[in-house]
Image: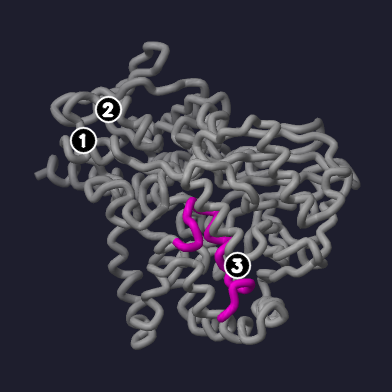
Amino acid sequence: MRRRIAVIGAGHHGLVAAVRLAARGHDVLVLEAASAPGGAVRSAASTLPGFTHDICSGFFPLTAASPAFGDLDLALDWVNPPVAMVHVLDGEGEEVALHRDLAATIDSLEACAPGAGVAWGELMRTLWPHRHALISAGLSRLPPLRDGATLLARLRSRALELAPMALASSASLGRGLFGSDRAAAWLAGSGAHADLSPQAAGSGAFSLGLNFLGHVVGWPFPRGGAGRLTEALVTQLRERGAEVRCANAVAHIEARRGRVAAVRLAGGERLAVDAAVCTVSPGPLLSLLPDGAFPARVKERLRRWRYGLGTVKLDYALSAPVPWPGPRAREAGVVHVGGALGELVTSLEQAGDGRFPDRPALVVGQHSLHDGTRAPDGQHTLYVYARVPQQPELSDDEVAERIEERIEQFAPGFRKLVLARAIRSPAAIEAENPSLRGGDLAAGSCELDQQLLFRPAPELCRCRTPLRGLYVAGAWVHPGPGVHGVSGRAAADALLADQRWRVRNAVR
């Protein structure tokens, strides 16, 4: 039976859900408040003409691994640098590299700390035969019964030995594995992509997962910019007869007899629908709900939802590549400017305490080294972000000065190359996308009390809600942040399953 379904939000989760629903023959309308689709997966010429910058998401290992994207035949040309990431330890050229090739990574770790590479190699060889089961268990809706059972059966006696890694901090995991703070910094730097300090419980799983994916699928990105991924999804939607309406903010969800009946737009237009998939995070979602839609305890959970650290994002147009002293950093897709483990810890903890870090940990993307479409010949883009307080006490110019000083410390001569820069504060990021409250790219802290069943609540973590016909998806829903589309696909599948159930019961 053909249904009219509204998808609220044209980020990648909403688009994945819409493609899946439209492919099943439903009348799908995607409603987006911003002037363009994509959410955090967009590109723009934010510095100078001819320079293409990714505004938020810049690297896509989870996309490459995700079953939600494996089902889609997207017309994309992926760029996958052989050196996925380098962690630079100082301004003298000491570095540790994550190569897609395991042997090269082992050599890099061994050069940093004898025994560290051997330990990493042993762990990777233990996990490698189970890589597909690990990814399926991590990127699936709750509970991951089949994938989890398969993984446990394959790991057998090693499961109990490896399980504590999921709860460990990246600092303790790295120290225990490598016996070296310098090598541990290489692991912990990947955890800083979330809002977690290297000393936070559970940060080890983020770090280990990202670096493991570096060997399994790399850290790829679409040639031409992150926006190409959004364009490919929108093309599939339109080929299936669905509609995407931008600059059409939803102001209210209407219900009748305990079921979604319509959505009302900010301009007053009312659209009758049979169901809705909502991808906005808890703060904006609460303002859309009709009275009595959720039980009081669920509304309170959403009201108390804890957004994580803010983000400051800088884009640069450069006259030449960054002059890193180390050879691997000069060819890496991503450079983690973090220094020793203690510096990473201090940066994340200062941000968590509401202070702009003295020496901020940086994620630096070098897309144009591998994708000549990003900048004019001989020139380059640079993608930089740091996790900071949601309300930094510094002006944009002071923020840029501190970040550029940090890059200059590790790459002397960087400042001479800057042709132009663009900066987006946490407030600017939220203004563009209200789901990213306080500039939190994960739409909710990744600490352990907001994971699994509690992302965001037991009643919502599987994408259904107490209001019949309303489904949720996004980074704030299990399995959390990253461009993987899992909750978008899960919301669509839950809707389709409920529709089949209603049809069967109507026939009876």
Residue that numbered label 2 is attached to = 289
* Amino acid at circle 1: Leu
Q: Secondary structure at mark 3?
A: helix
In the rendered structure, which amino acid carries the disc numbered 3? Ala
The stretch in magenta equals 179-199
Residue 430 higher or lower than 347, as above or below: above
Labels 2 and 1: the sequence-earlier one = 2
Does residue 475 appear anywhere in the picture?
Answer: yes
Residue 500 screen position, x and y as percent: 23, 46
**In which quadrant is the C terminus drawn?**
top left
- Quadrant in the rendering for residue 412: bottom right
Q: CA distance from mark 2 to mark 3?
A: 44 Å
Q: Residue furthest left?
A: 508
Q: Which mark is residue 63?
A: none
What secondary structure is marked by label 1? loop
Say which element carries label 2.
loop
- Which residue is at 34% across, 46% downward? 491
Mark on residue 467?
1
Residue 82 lies, in percent from the top left, at 72, 67
> According to the image, label 3 marks what residue?
185
| The magenta stretch spans residue 196 | yes
Tell me: 249 left or right of 210: left
The answer to whether residue 34 is magenta is no
Mark found first going from the N terminus, 1 or 3: 3
Label 1 environment density (alpha carbons within 10 Å; few <14, some 14–19, many ≥20): some
